[in-house]
Amino acid sequence: MTCYVESARNTRIISINRNLGNVFVNCPDSRKLRLVNLLRNLTFTQVQCACLPFNNMISAGARTLTYNHCTILLAFICAQLFGSLSFAQNSESQKAEQDKQAKKQTYTEDFESGMKAWKVTDEKCWKIEKANKSSVLSLFKKQTKYSPKVRSPRHIAINQVKQWKSFQLDVDVLSTHKDYNHRDVCIFFGYQNPSKFYYVHLGKKTDNAANQIFIVNDKPRTKISTKTTRGTNWDNKWHKVRIIRDANSGKIEVFFDNMKKPVMVAENKQFTWGKIGLGSFDDTAQFDNLVIKGIPYQTDSSNANSQKKNSHTPSHQK
């Protein structure tokens, strides 16, 4: 459809991507100017604006409308434009979401194949055990020779298969340590080297050093959680833990058994990618049924070499 609006010297043409004929708006100059100004604001991708001499408009064989019809005409034009724009925006949004979903991958670990995908800080503290006829990753020894350069957890098992950006992590966890205020289990993510990573500390009783989300960035662990609970109620049962990480916004959410309401929340963009890990600050625990759904971080050869150079943990010998 092409709408011709007459002015004193020329005609402004608003081209709409619809084959519905030509329309000539005939009205007094004051009202015409108001309509032209309204049409002039419709500068979307779907609209092309140009000026042609008045006689070109006549030769186009346009139909004539009075000003009383202009409101209907303008409403029709806007409906067409906004409909097209909305459709285009929705299509672009859907395409972006489809691209995002296409990049997502799922990684699962049931430990039935042992620990070949993991590196640990102290091999003498970790092993594969059987629990309820299932193989589990067991952190069975509290004492360790590993001593980090900065104040941070001492028991860490890092998965070597992938590095992750945004993700959802689910894992079954059993605390096997005797009960006390700082009885804990830790989940690690954004792990780049032994002095750069995030971790969730699921502690029995909350304080500034327990039951919080922390960052380790070349200095002792720092609390970054903005919300937490009074503590994680560890007992002798298995529990489900979920972590949702949005690398773009920096948001971190932690869930414990109830997957509808987070028990901890933080927001930080220091590390937008890294490896995943399991462990404890200095206690014992077991892990099973790890599932990670998210967007992997693709490293080039230089990044890979840097990661290898910065890694301090020995390969686990099965």
Image (cartoon, rainbow, N blue to C red):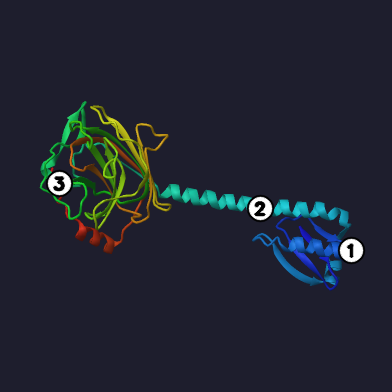
- How much space separates mark 2 and mark 1, taking CA atoms? 31 Å
Secondary structure found at label 2 = helix
The residue indicated by pointer 2 is 84
The residue indicated by pointer 1 is 28
Out of 4 and 207, give the one closest to the viewer: 207
Q: Tell me, for residue 316, which label it has, or none.
A: 3
- How much space separates mark 1 and mark 3, taking CA atoms? 86 Å
Q: Could you tell whether 300 is left or right of 178 in the image?
A: right
Q: Amino acid at mark 1?
A: Pro
The answer to whether any part of residue 190 appears in the image is no
Residue 228: x percent and y percent?
36, 40
Asked if the residues shown at circle 1 and circle 3 are in contact, with their CB atoms under 8 angstroms apart, the answer is no
Out of 61 and 203, give the one closest to the viewer: 203
Secondary structure found at label 1 = loop
Residue 267: x percent and y percent?
39, 50
Is disc 1 surrounded by few (<14), some (14 to 19) or many (20+) residues within 10 Å?
A: few
Q: State the quadrant of the C terminus.
A: top left
Vertical comparison of 275 with 142: above or below = below
Residue 184: x percent and y percent?
23, 38
For marks 1 and 3, the one nearer the N-term is: 1
